[in-house]
Image: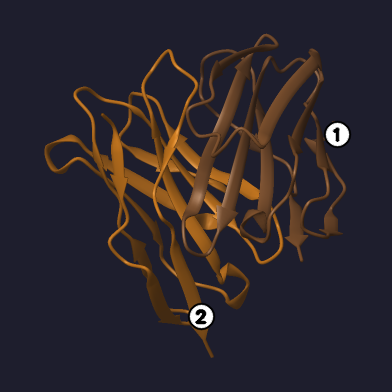
Chain colours: A orange, B brown
Amino acid sequence: AQSVTQPDIHITVSEGASLELRCNYSYGATPYLFWYVQSPGQGLQLLLKYFSGDTLVQGIKGFEAEFKRSQSSFNLRKPSVHWSDAAEYFCAVGPPGFQKLVFGTGTRLLVSP
Amino acid sequence: DAGVIQSPRHEVTEMGQEVTLRCKLISGHNSLFWYRQTMMRGLELLIYFNNNVPIDDSGMPEDRFSAKMPNASFSTLKIQPSEPRDSAVYFCASTAGQNNEQFFGPGTRLTVL
């Protein structure tokens, strides 16, 4: 069965500092991988996705993620965090050809001035 | 393009009452997912449909919950009778094809007193 682990429940980063949110997945082959962001009171918005090809994926709002097959990881990064990035971030995995996604438990990002 | 539309955005009801949540898919999408989000349990998939047919309802918590897709663009999630533990934010999401990218609605915040 597929599973997604986001080991950090909360992360606090100073504005302007770099960010890395961790995501590890369990799946027999290479799945489709996603990062979503949820701002307070809002639905989930897709930040970026990986299906195949280049393992470094660029997304919206200056985010990027790197797929590392050997580590079963898909960590999200941003070089300089803005106060508006404070939100909850979800990693999700889905097997190619199917539509059901498995979501991680989320990481809440707090941005300090 | 209009995104996924959910109504109502907020619902406050008393225990024992029937609650109906509504969702309109993005035009051209053929799969619909209902999720429930709580602090304790995170984001849970309740049920999903493909081409109006329920594919996986293993996440539906009890017989009090039912979901329908009367046509290709609309779905309802009904709780009858509602209980305080049903209080949560309910999201629907839609997708097209098999690329797994789900588009989320803004959610319905349900409070059962």
Please provide percent x and percent y for residue A97. 42, 12
Please provide percent x and percent y for residue A99. 50, 21
Establish if A67 lies above or below A18.
above
Q: Which one is nearer the viewer's eye here, A38 or B22?
A: B22
Establish if A45 lies above or below B55.
below
Q: Residue at x 70, y 11 (%)?
A: B52
> In this view of the protein, can residue A102 be seen by the observer?
yes
Instruction: Say which residue label 1 marks.
Output: B2
Q: In the displayed image of the protein, which residue is found farthest to the left?
A: A70
Instruction: Say which residue label 2 marks.
Output: A111
Q: Is residue B14 left or right of residue A7?
A: right
Pinpoint the chain carrying mark 2: A
Mark 1 lies on a secondary structure that is loop
Q: Residue at x 47, y 26 (%)?
A: A100
Please provide percent x and percent y for residue A85. 57, 68
User: Which corner quadrant of the image does residue B2 belong to?
Assistant: top right
Establish if B101 lies above or below B105.
above
Image quadrant holding the C terminus of chain A, namely: bottom right
Q: Which one is nearer the viewer's eye here, B111 or A31?
A: B111
Q: Is residue A22 left or right of residue A34?
A: left
Q: Residue at x 56, y 35 (%)?
A: B46
Image quadrant holding the N terminus of chain A, namely: top left
Give the amino acid type for the residue marked by disc 2 in the picture: Val
Give the amino acid type for the residue marked by disc 1 in the picture: Ala
Quick one: label 1, few (<14), some, or many (20+) residues within 10 Å?
few
> In this view of the protein, can residue A15 be seen by the observer?
no
Q: Which one is nearer the viewer's eye here, B68 or B18?
A: B18
Measured in 3D between alpha carbons, the distance from the residue under mark 2 to the one under mark 1, in whole angstroms, is 31 Å
